[in-house]
Amino acid sequence: MQNKQNRVGIHRTFSLRDEESDLLRADGTRARRPLWDTGWGPERAARYAARCARYVDAARIELRVRGRAAVRLDFPYGGGRGPQRADAAHDVAALFGIQVRRLDRAAGRALRVTGNAEEVARFTAALPRILEHAESLASWAARMYGTWTRSSAHAEFFAALTPHQRRCHARTWRFHAFRTVVAALTGPDGAPVPEYDPAEVPWEQAAALAGGVGQYGWVDIRDAYDPAEAVQLLDAAVPVPVSVDTRPVPPGEQLALFDRPFPAQRRAGRVVIISGWRAGSPRAFESREGACQQVSGVRSPRLAISRNLRVVAGSSLVLR
């Protein structure tokens, strides 16, 4: 029996490393985590793990500053269901309080998830189990479609379809069934479902039929992860170095707040080097031929600066 009475807000009571495989109810009793059952025996557990692994490929988690992390998720094509599973992951991520960005808008099968590091690890560990649960419920709804194709009540409709049209019709029904099941799993427990209308054909009532299946299989998917697996993902994470400008900074200058190319500098003309402003100290002026001339006995910079000189950086003068 899956535990359905443990939905809370985004805030977690325990940190990830303090969590146990069982859940602690409000009354002090323990309960198994949702989607914890992987089958009876090692062979069924291995088959379950293989099914979960084929839905999503998760890269290594990247640790960032201030306790945040990011991970890239790629969804294999899977008979055209990859984009739909990516949409489901987008809806599930909202329950973990993390953000999702699409990396390939054309194919729709790659996502980047960012947020709190522990929540990203929980989400990455839980997503394959959640997708497997949603696929199994959608397959249950798809079997309903098989019974309609063999029913005499709808024999005339299906007899008028070509084999290609029947396959397309079946895929369309499963597409809507999967989307409805995901909406039920990511929504609250006991959400209202439209009632079935016997006057309408059943394959036009995915919200009623598949929605009922989703509500029947509802579990708190925010807790559908193995804490030990999430800790392993966090321990294997790769820290992302912070990019720092390593260019040497001349004395007296400040680092720029933003990376931007420096403007092209003009080649300076004749340069005046003044070592001091005391009276009688030597000054060196670059002549037109490049030689330096010593000037002494200058009591004020005004005596050495002509109309062809300008101040460059406070201590250098450029001769025009």
Image (cartoon, rainbow, N blue to C red):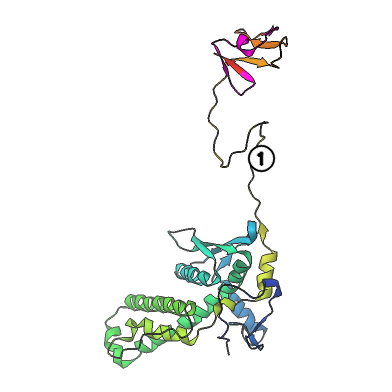
Tell me residue 289's x, y (percent).
Answer: 62, 7
Q: Residue at x 52, y 64 (%)?
A: 99
In this rendering, is residue 137 above or below 269? below
Tell me residue 140's x, y (percent).
Answer: 46, 85
Tell me residue 97's x, y (percent).
Answer: 54, 68
On the rendered structure, is 247 left or right of 171? right
In this rendering, is residue 65 above or below 300? below
Viewer-side residue, 273 vs 266? 273
On the rendered structure, is 20 left or right of 288? right
Tell me residue 284's x, y (percent).
Answer: 68, 11
Give the total of numbered labels. Answer: 1
Viewer-side residue, 7 vs 1? 7
* Callout 1 amino acid: Thr
Q: Residue at x 26, y 87 (%)?
A: 156
Q: In the picture, residue 248 is in which quadrant?
A: top right
Residue 300 sits inside the magenta stretch? yes
In the image, farthest residue toward the right: 281
Q: In the picture, residue 113 is in which quadrant?
A: bottom right
Viewer-side residue, 266 vs 233? 266
Q: In the picture, residue 179 is in which quadrant?
A: bottom left
In the image, farthest residue toward the bottom: 152
Which quarter of the rendering shows the C terminus?
top right
Say what secondary structure mark 1 lies in.
Answer: loop
Classify 10 Å Cα crowding around label 1: few (below 14), some (14-19), many (20 and above): few
Viewer-side residue, 287 vs 79? 287
Where does the magenta region start and end? 293-316
Residue with the mark numbered 1: 246
Confirm whether residue 63 shows in the render. no
